[in-house]
Image: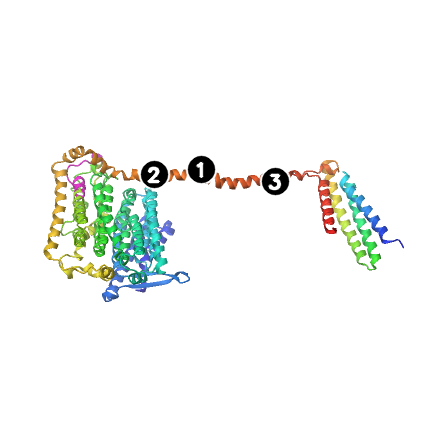
Amino acid sequence: MKYVWLIVFFPFLGFLINGFLSKFFNKKVVAFIAASAIGLAFLCGLVTLVKLLAYPPEARSIEITFYSWIKAGGFNIEAGFLIDPLTMVMVLVVSGVSFLIHIYAGEYMEEDPGYVRFFVYLNLFVSMMLTLVMANNFLLMFVGWEGVGLCSYLLIGFWFEKDSASNAGKKAFIVNRIGDFGFLIAMFIIATTFHTLNFKVVFEKAPQMFQVGSGLITAATLLLFVGATGKSAQIPLYVWLPDAMEGPTPVSALIHAATMVTAGVYMMARCSVLYALAPFSLGVVAVIGCLTAVYAASMALVQVDMKRVLAYSTISQIGYMVLGCGVGAFAAGIFHLMTHAFFKALLFLCAGSVSHALAGELDIRKMGNLHKKMPITHITFLSATLAISGIIPFAGFFSKDEVLFETFMSHHNVLYILGLIGALMTAFYMFRLYFIAFRGESHVEPELEKHIHEPSWRMALPLCVLGVLSLIGGWIQLPFFHNLKILGGFLSPVFHHAHEISKMEEASVSVWLEGALMTLSLIVAGLGILIAYKFYIKNPELPKRLGEKFAGLYKLLFNKYYVDEIYQMVVVKPLYNLSEILSIAVDQAVIDGSVNGTGRSLMGVGGVLRRTTTGYVQFYGLVMFLGAVILLLWNLF
Amino acid sequence: MIPLNYYLILSGILFTIGIIGVLYRRNTLIIFMSIELMLNSANLTFVAFSRFLGNLDGQIFVFFVMVVAAAEVVVGLAIIVNLYRHHKSISADRANLLKW
């Protein structure tokens, strides 16, 4: 257990080696170093998991501190790692998915002049993400939190010569700063109340020091949630994620779908004890999560850029995870996080494979009938689409159903219905994507048509692995049978305290109810698929007619509810104008004025006084003489 | 014996002549001579006080002053020679470049 630091160290080593020594390597070596660094981290993670499983379930929370990082009076922060089931799930998901994506990117980025830079950033990202999930205190977590934000910024703006890319990077960074601000204040509150930032100590002290519903904890958890809305792209800070698609596709898959954006969900799960103490915050979390899930899904309905559809779908799916946390079912949220990492990474990688074949084309109106020429991409994409739509027995079915089931069981009926509507839209827009891009008639330009090809094994292998995971990833948490909920059982020691506080006893649910709800969500998903089929295969004219009939609604959705424009008008423009005023009135007038004024007045005085320097040596002599006389007289009288 | 005051008055007169010479005359050689006059007026007081107080400290100081004056003459005359070479004149008013 002493050696868990290797998990973070290997990606960082890869970052250093590629960052400083890449001059001596060719592209193959660079890709090999980057991928093997992640692979080694994954292996270390597996070893740690095996070791952790050797402990009895209650003892599976091991803190390893390395050194005293900050020491001021009684306030002491020990840098170290906390190894428990939640951390292990995150570590394995992060390192496993990023390992596959590194292999994929090795070929995908082949032609790019920034090949080395790409892998350097990617390795740094992984080491930061692993720091985030393994940290034993809020501050170290914040280091990882900011680190992944930085890497996200660098990678969104990877093609910084393009204006849109560099702007998207800036947008992501600034929007995230707003969220980070909330995180920081929450951290201050925790530090002043508990005099420590260590997770274990805080979570042990909190139930003893505070009653359920205490104002301080509510404030802290709400502020933490502000941080989560920034990082995990929830209402109202989700706006950066669709623009983040300017980055290379492997980045979208890794950072903006599978790992970084789920950091907020992880953070809330980590603080489950605090959230359990603040039912109001939980309510807010649940409502925001559910609204985001539906709202983002509605925007995904009409987008025509493949990656943008997937981006909105990501926001929507994270909404489900947040909803899961909000209803107190943290394990369900983490479960959905895990399956989502598989199928959403896969969807993005398939999108990358398609754009690779079509020379960078991502507009789905210029695709169609790709399934014949790209069988592997087609079959894996279908697998992921079925998973996200929630079709049994694919992974997404189990996780999404569990989130919705828990929502229903905690008597949030409105949220449950909204969640079902979101699921309907999810099934619809995903199959819309599938039908338009892979079925139907081909709209590919004839010039490109000839070049359509399946990628080589380096890109195809991650697709296949993730495709299989999208199928079987959900089987570690099967419904109905209590002893088949492997993930839930594994995670239960972590969330045990939170459940105790909120007195959520494992209600004995009748099998009939569970089965009925499950059938309902299956019917809903099937309905979504059926509508998509009607719209885009049977009757391709229908969507156009509908779009014309409901032109207003269509325009509203297509323009993403004009939220970007509203933010621009309400927040960005006034701030910009204020800065302009401050720049002229305060900076230029007052500050520059005082600085320049000091200089100018000194020059004026000097201009007068320099006249006394005549250059005539006898004048100097006279002054000296008079001075001596004055001194003499002064002394005498 | 001549009283001390007489020496001091003579010395004061010499010193004043020296000051006026330095401040009024434009010819650097004359200024130079006036400086020597001031030094020697100081020497005179030294010697007078030495005699009056009955110890030799003042007379020793006079030797020092003479040495310094000799050294000063060396440097000063060199400057004057250079001044002449530069301006073809030794007027103090011509050497007025060290100013604003």
- Which chain is disc 3 placed on? A
- Give the Cα separation between the discs numbered 3 and 2: 50 Å
Looking at the rendered structure, the kind of residue marked 2 is Asp
Q: In the rendering, which numbered label is found on residue B21?
A: none
- Which residue lies at the image location 81% right of the left edge and 59% below the top edge? B56
- Which residue lies at the image location 72% right of the left edge and 40% below the top edge? A619
Q: Nearer the viewer, residue A287 or A458?
A: A287
Circle 2 residue: A163
- Check the image and report above or below for A407 versus A61: above
Sequence-earlier tag: 3 or 2: 2
Residue A493: where, in percent of width, then height?
Answer: 23, 62
Q: Are marks 3 and 2 on the same chain?
A: yes
Q: Residues within 10 Å of mark 1 (few under 14, many from 20)?
A: few
Residue A162: where, in percent of width, then height?
Answer: 33, 39
Looking at the rendered structure, the kind of residue marked 1 is Ile
Q: Nearer the viewer, residue A41 or A51?
A: A51
Sequence-earlier tag: 3 or 1: 1
- Which chain is disc 2 placed on? A
Q: In the rendering, which numbered label is found on residue A584?
A: 1
Between circles 2 and 1, the one closer to the viewer is: 1
- As for residue A440 lying within the magenta part, the answer is yes
Task: Evaluate whether residue A99 shows in this view.
Answer: no
Looking at the rendered structure, the kind of residue marked 3 is Gly
Which residue range is magenta in the image? A429-447
Which quadrant of the rendered structure holds the N terminus of chain B? Answer: bottom right
- Which chain is disc 1 placed on? A
Look at the numbered disc 1 and give the secondary structure of its residue. Answer: helix
Look at the numbered disc 3 and give the secondary structure of its residue. Answer: helix
The chief SS type of the magenta part is helix
Apparent side of residue A606 relative to residue A261 in the rendered image (left or right): right
Circle 3 residue: A606
Apparent side of residue A47 relative to residue B74 in the rendered image (left or right): left
